Image (spheres, grey):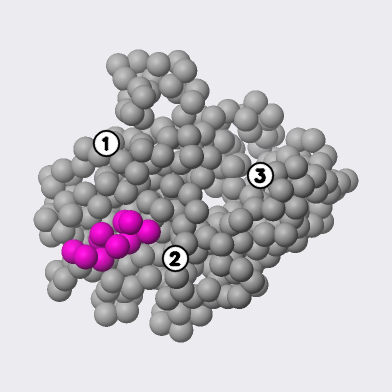
């Protein structure tokens, strides 16, 4: 298939594109380039790509594609809390507009990267795709709105699928350290401490970036009737862990690391365990990476590439990176490049 991947220069896109290419798909990227040079280790080889703000995509950009894989977003809760309106403008309005433009351009498949955080405070029971959605942050709320609005335009010619990814982990050349396992391993490598600021009790479902990429490939290649306007949770029940459990896996992976649960931020209301059986039953998908394996991989890659504290703080943390671009005048207040941009 001819596939357009938005956010191809991001954390997930950098892992996903080579997997889709290896499977024989003709991939083109579309990215605004905020994180294109946020690389640790070997520089990735990008596909042919368009540097276009998601808010500016036109029908002409999307003509000739069989599928759109939509990964691009302003990611994570701290950024959404700092700039909720921009988060909604990009993550919600621009995403729905992208789907409408894709449909107008004749794109048949639309794969949307949603999130398990749409379940919010779900307690200790396993939640499936039909559970009530209780988003607690602007980021999660934007995902719910996109699912609703894109589902409303599905028809015989346009088939969206909503892949609700668990919290991602694992190494990508375009690294992120503002997600829980990646963050804890990085802190351990740089300081010797595995520092948990909450009380460690919230449940989190986790999934490796490569398993997310494999899930998208599975959905991309599935029969239309298996993916038409369906939501699938992406992850595995084995990786439903408390934050304290996740931290213990880091202690095991990083020699000499010590666990510190400070509890200074108190109990986190975002706590949910997720049922991933629908995707497994419908399409035979099984996530392969355990959290322990991911912690070991991250330790190996961080030490091999020489992760530095300054890069941790500024280059691989989404909020800090965007604030840095704004401070030097490369981005304006609406998160658009200026004439001083890159």
By secondary structure, the bulk of the magenta-drawn segment is best described as: helix
Along the viewing direction, whichever of 144 and 328 lies nearer the viewer: 144
Please tell me whether residue 152 belongs to the stretch shown in magenta.
yes
**Rendered position, 99 above or below 74:** below
Alpha carbon separation for disc pair 2 and 3: 27 Å
| Quarter that holds the N terminus | bottom left
Q: Answer with mark 3 or mark 1, whichever residue precedes in sequence.
A: 1
- Which numbered dot is residue 169? none
Precedes in sequence: disc 2 or disc 3: 2
Residue 279 in the image: x percent, y percent? 45, 76
Position in image of residue 116 (x %, y %): 49, 62
Query: Would residue 189 be counted in the magenta stretch?
Result: no
Q: Secondary structure at mark 1?
A: loop
309 lies above or below 16: above
Question: In terms of secondary structure, where does tag 3 sit?
Answer: helix
Give above or below for 18 relative to 119: above
Instruction: Residue 146: name its quadrant.
Output: bottom left
Q: Which mark is residue 183?
A: 3
Which of the two marks, 2 or 3, is nearer to us in this view? 2
In space, the residues marked 3 and 1 are separated at their CA atoms by 30 Å
Residue 143 seen from this side: yes
Q: State the residue position of label 1.
A: 52
**Residue highlighted by disc 2:** 133
Q: Which residues are magenta?
A: 144-153
**In the rendered image, which quarter is residue 173 located in?**
top right
Q: Residues within 10 Å of mark 2 (few under 14, many from 20)?
A: some
Q: Nearer the viewer, residue 145 or 190?
A: 145
């Amino acid at each position: 298939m001819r596939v357009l991947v938005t956010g191809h220069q991001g954390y997930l896109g950098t892992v996903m594109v080579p997997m889709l290419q290896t499977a024989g798909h003709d991939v083109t990227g579309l990215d605004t380039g905020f994180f294109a040079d946020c690389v640790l280790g070997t520089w990735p080889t990008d596909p042919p790509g368009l540097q276009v703000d998601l808010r500016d995509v036109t029908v002409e950009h999307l003509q000739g594609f069989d599928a759109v894989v939509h990964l691009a977003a302003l990611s994570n809760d701290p950024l959404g809390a700092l700039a909720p309106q921009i988060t909604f403008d990009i993550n919600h309005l621009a995403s729905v507009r992208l789907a409408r433009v894709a449909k107008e351009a004749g794109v048949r498949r639309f794969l949307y990267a949603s999130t398990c955080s749409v379940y919010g405070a779900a307690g200790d029971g396993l939640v499936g795709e039909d559970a009530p959605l209780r988003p607690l942050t602007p980021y999660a709320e934007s995902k719910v709105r996109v699912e609703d609005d894109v589902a409303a335009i599905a028809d015989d010619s346009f088939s969206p699928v909503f892949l609700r990814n668990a919290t991602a982990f694992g190494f990508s050349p375009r690294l992120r350290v503002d997600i829980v396992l990646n963050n804890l391993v990085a802190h351990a490598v740089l300081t010797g401490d595995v520092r948990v600021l909450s009380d460690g009790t919230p449940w989190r479902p986790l999934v490796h970036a490569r398993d997310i990429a494999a899930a998208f490939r599975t959905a991309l290649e599935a029969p239309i009737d298996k993916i038409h306007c369906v939501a699938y949770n992406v992850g595995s029940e084995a990786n439903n862990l408390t934050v304290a459990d996740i931290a213990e896996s880091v202690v095991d992976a990083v020699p000499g690391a010590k666990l510190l649960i400070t509890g200074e931020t108190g109990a986190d209301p975002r706590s949910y365990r997720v049922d991933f059986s629908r995707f497994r039953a419908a399409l035979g998908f099984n996530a392969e990476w355990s959290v322990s394996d991911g912690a070991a991989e991250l330790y190996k890659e961080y030490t091999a590439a020489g992760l530095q504290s300054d890069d941790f703080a500024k280059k691989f943390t989404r909020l800090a990176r965007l604030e840095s671009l704004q401070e030097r005048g490369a981005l304006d207040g609406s998160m658009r490049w200026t004439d001083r941009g890159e």
